Image (spheres, helix red, strand yellow):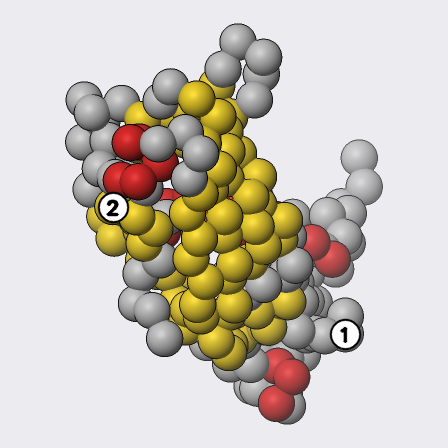
Amino acid sequence: MSDQPHIHLGSLLRSSTDEAHVDGELDHLTYQQGKETQTLRFAEPAPFDIDVNALGGDEMYLQGSFEPTLIMECARCLRDVEVPLELTLGTLMRYDPAATEPYLEEAESGEDVLVFGDPNLDLSAYLAETTLLGAPLSVLHDEACKGLCQVCGHDLNEGPCEHSAAVPVEAIDTDLGTPEGSTHARQNPFATLRGLDLPED
């Protein structure tokens, strides 16, 4: 199993009739975002199959497939959620010896072009970006997920906590105030005036 997906493109740069191929499996992907290393976790080995064909000059075309089962966090309770993806790969490529790291740029046609400077190309960043673009923005481990207690962080799917009777901030009726004893909600400063017996003018 590969730690990082590399493809060797030296022969394509020397001959426009050659092609390059790489396949394997990944149990994770690491890539750089700014100056920080990020990691995408997979629930099982993720197969990839990639071909690169020369188009002439310094241009090439990459195509293939990548099928990761991405591990994401439930948007409510932060449990791990397995998200299977079937990604079709396809992008123009251009060799530029001045490029110290591979990057995507937009061509005049509007298509993305993968620019690289090292013939031993690390595809980690490209596969990571393709995975993130293909993944949903957020997921739930269950549609009925109850989330976490806003006070103590207890997972409410495992049962109530001492704060469970409190009313969430969203459910407060600002005209009536907050039920007595609520620790989740912001108290209505006028709620204590409800029972006050004021003299009539």
Q: Amino acid at mark 2?
A: Asn
Q: Is residue 100 left or right of residue 186?
A: left
Residue 188 image position (x, y, % from top left) = 63, 51
In the picture as drawn, the residue positioned furthest to the top comes out as: 108
Q: Is residue 66 left or right of residue 19?
A: right
Relative vertical location of residue 143 with respect to residue 10 in this rendering, above or below: below
Mark 1 lies on residue: 144
Determine the image quadrant of residue 30. bottom left
Marks counted in the figure total 2
Mark 2 lies on residue: 120
Determine the image quadrant of residue 196. bottom right
Q: Going from the N terminus, do you reach mark 1 or mark 2 first?
A: 2
Asked if the residues shown at circle 1 and circle 2 are in contact, with their CB atoms under 8 angstroms apart, the answer is no
Residue at screen point 27% across, 23% down? 96
Which residue is at the front of the view, 42 or 113? Answer: 113
Residue at screen point 30% across, 67% down? 3
Residue 37 image position (x, y, % from top left) = 25, 53
Distance, label 1 to label 2, CA atoms, is: 47 Å
Residue 97 appears in the rendering: yes
